[in-house]
Image: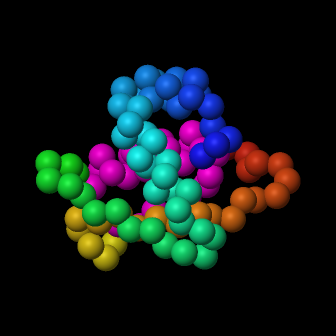
Amino acid sequence: MAALTQARIDEAAAKARMKVDLLREYLEYIYRVRPGEVGMLTCNEGETVREVRQNLTLAAAVAGEPIGISLRRNPRAVCFWLEKRRRGRPRKAG
């Protein structure tokens, strides 16, 4: 997380209308998972799976880490993992 500057975190949080502390929390979750491992986040009281997934996706975009997300096993939990980065030119959109 040292690679991310405070300004970049503040900017991303402002764009997403998300609290900076919450964004940092999700960034820490992403950085704890090593390649080949699966992380699992459970929803807190008053929080939906959709909110957790959106926050996790935003934090991954800020960190520049491609992640995979699965919602299949537990209806109150989100499983995620780091995906391998593709080499070369990005795929053509559309």
Q: On the rendered structure, is 83 left or right of 9?
A: right
Instruction: Between residue 85 and residue 18, name the one nearer to us.
Output: 18
Instruction: Between residue 87 and residue 14, name the one nearer to us.
Output: 14
Which residue: 52% across, 23% down?
Answer: 11
* The furthest residue to the left: 46
Residue 13 among those drawn in magenta: no
Chief secondary structure of the magenta portion: helix
Q: Position of residue 42 (x, y in %)?
A: 28, 63
Q: On the rendered structure, is 4 left or right of 50?
A: right
Q: Position of residue 69 (x, y in %)?
A: 46, 62
Query: Is residue 89 in view from this perspective?
Result: yes
Q: Quadrant of residue 87?
A: bottom right
What is the tally of numbered marks visible in this picture?
0
Indicate the quadrant containing the C terminus: top left, top right, bottom left or bottom right. top right
Which residue: 43% across, 49% down?
Answer: 26
Which residue: 22% across, 51% down?
Answer: 48
Q: Quadrant of residue 17?
A: top left
Query: Is residue 57 in view from this perspective?
Result: no
Instruction: Between residue 91 and residue 43, name the one nearer to us.
Output: 43
Q: On the rendered structure, is 23 left or right of 91?
A: left
Q: Position of residue 4 (x, y in %)?
A: 63, 37
* The furthest residue to the right: 88
Residue 55 among those drawn in magenta: yes
The vertical placement of 53 against 59, above or below, is below
Q: Over which residues does the magenta segment extend?
A: 49-71
Instruction: Between residue 2 and residue 18, name the one nearer to us.
Output: 2
Q: How is the image coloured?
A: rainbow
Which residue: 58% across, 24% down?
Answer: 7
